[in-house]
Amino acid sequence: MQGIFGAVQKTSLRLKWWRTTGLDYRNLTGPLEFDDFISVFSFSDLFRNLRHPTGGSFIRPNKVNFGTDFLTAIKNRYVLEDGPEEDRKEQIVTLGNKPVETVGFDSLMKQQSQLSKLQEVSLRNCAVSCAGEKGEVAEACPNIRRVDLSKNLLSSWDEVIHIADQLRHLEVLNLSENKLKFPSGSALTGTFSALKVLVLNQTGITWAEVLRCAAWCPGLEELYLESNNIVISGRPTDVLQTVKLLDLSSNQLIDENQLYLIAHLPRLEQLILSDIGISSIHFPDAGIGCKTSMFPSLQYLVVNDNQISQWSFFNELDKLPSLRALSCLRNPLTKEDKEANATRQLIIASIGQLKTLNKCEILPKERQTAELDYRKAFGNEWKQAGGHQDPDKNRLSEEFLTAHPRYQFLCLKYGAPEDWELKTQQPFMLKNQLLTLKIKYPDQLDQKVLEKQLPGSMTIQKVKGWLSRLLKVPVSDLLLSYESPKEPGIEIKLENDLQSLRFYSVENEDCLLVRW
């Protein structure tokens, strides 16, 4: 450091403006003297974004905050100052430009000021730098269970351990945005014996340090590691075995192969992989239609803000035996556009056990519609690949089975698509779009059979609206189906109001059946 200042003293220079100094050095041309008014430090917010080990900045010595101990910070935040009781009964706070009188806050503040009863403590950005005197935290605040120490001046795990060691009931600890160094020597087993939730976002922690830290937390259930540039470099064998939620968001160095290293955590139920740049995933131990042994307990997967652009990604997710919920927003394949609903339907059809997609429940009717649409959409491709209505004559190509691994199951569930379902649409001309239909009312024998021309692109919802006006019957009471003279005795329900007549393969001379 002296060498740096020596060079500064020997050379005339012009310094850039630093927002943290409050001094304007733009016109400075003379040499700097270290002892005058400038010191260099490398901690706190000044260097939070400077990764270099010798990084620093210029700051006035009288503006430096060296931090405070844990208990003092609690007292500053929660303990009421002495004063007349009447002065604390009512307080005026300003919301926008309007003063608001608070009532009852005094009793809440009194309760919080009793440190021995505190269970939840928030000390975010309170300049906590150390634990303080040994034993004083345990004596003053023995019942604390949840602590937020994010964005403070903690620089060593030693101080964190000294704090946690005095909080025997500590269950939740947030250390985000502290640049923590690990202590030398062996790990301290059982230091966080009651801890269930540990938040280490933006701490610069490495995977090796994560595993070392996890050894102190035998009952850990939730671990948050967002934005740490982590590379998963080893398989957790004796640690993280109780973790149910793992957040690895915004760690851009993680790839598909690294995920295999955490694939056998026995209790992992929620995995958050948002913004890690992943585009593909593959479970090599499971073939077409089989389930993987990886991630055996995973129920909820989050892959928002990634690079997913191939349907094979969702086909692979169908191999996860316990997957019930998926969030995959803002990917190339799932962008919010006019095709968003069709994309949702395809994902639902691709993952058979899914119950929730992008935080929206998948109702049984939506699943049935999605799977029937999928079965029809790829019906011609299925037939060209060797598909046949007779299962004994099926000779499907490996390429088709790989691209559509659930198609055979859907054929078993709903029946193989018939030839009349697979007819391609005719060119878009008015004469080809008008369908001549007979309209019958099976439950209303006094109603005459009506013949009507309707556009094939007309949605079921619009057909119901027209019939509602014609019959003076509420739209909600109408049930539609149709039958074709080519398939006598087979009645097809028109259940999806958003689909068109052409979608259901309604043709000329078909009969529309109306009930209410």
Image (cartoon, rainbow, N blue to C red):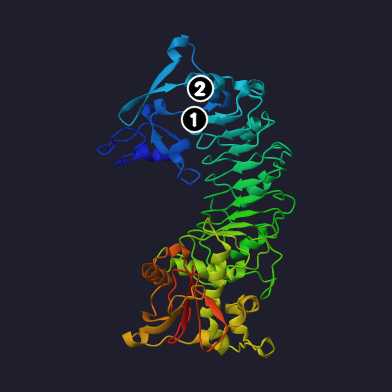
Does residue 405 show up?
no
Q: Nearer the viewer, residue 486 or 193?
A: 486
Contact, mark 1 vs mark 2 (Cβ under 8 Å):
yes
Tell which circle, 1 or 2, labels the residue nearer the N-terminal end.
2
Q: Looking at this rendering, what residue extends furthest in the front direction?
A: 446
Q: How many marks?
A: 2
Secondary element at image label 1: loop
Location of residue 170 in the rendering, given as x and y in whole percent from the top left corner: 66, 33
Q: Distance between the Cα atoms at labels 1 and 2?
A: 9 Å
Q: Residue at 70% x, 89% y: name it.
A: 392
Location of residue 333 in the rendering, given as x and y in whole percent from the top left corner: 47, 68
Q: Residue at 71% x, 65% y: name it.
A: 293
Give the image quarter of residue 464: bottom left
Location of residue 495 in the rendering, given as x and y in whole percent from the top left corner: 50, 70
Image check: 44 left or right of 158?
left
In the rendered structure, find residue 403 and report the number of the disc placed on it: none
Image check: 25 left or right of 52?
left
Q: Nearer the viewer, residue 168 or 503?
A: 503
Q: Looking at this rendering, what residue extends furthest in the left direction?
A: 27
Location of residue 494 in the rendering, given as x and y in whole percent from the top left corner: 49, 73
Secondary element at image label 2: helix
Question: Label 2 sits on what residue type?
Answer: Asn
Q: Nearer the viewer, residue 41 or 261?
A: 261
Q: Residue at 63% x, 42% y: name it.
A: 197
In the rendered structure, find residue 76 and report the number of the disc placed on it: 2
Q: Which residue is mark 1?
A: 126
Question: Label 1 sits on what residue type?
Answer: Cys
Q: Residue at 57% x, 40% y: name it.
A: 180
Q: Residues within 10 Å of mark 1 (few under 14, many from 20)?
A: many
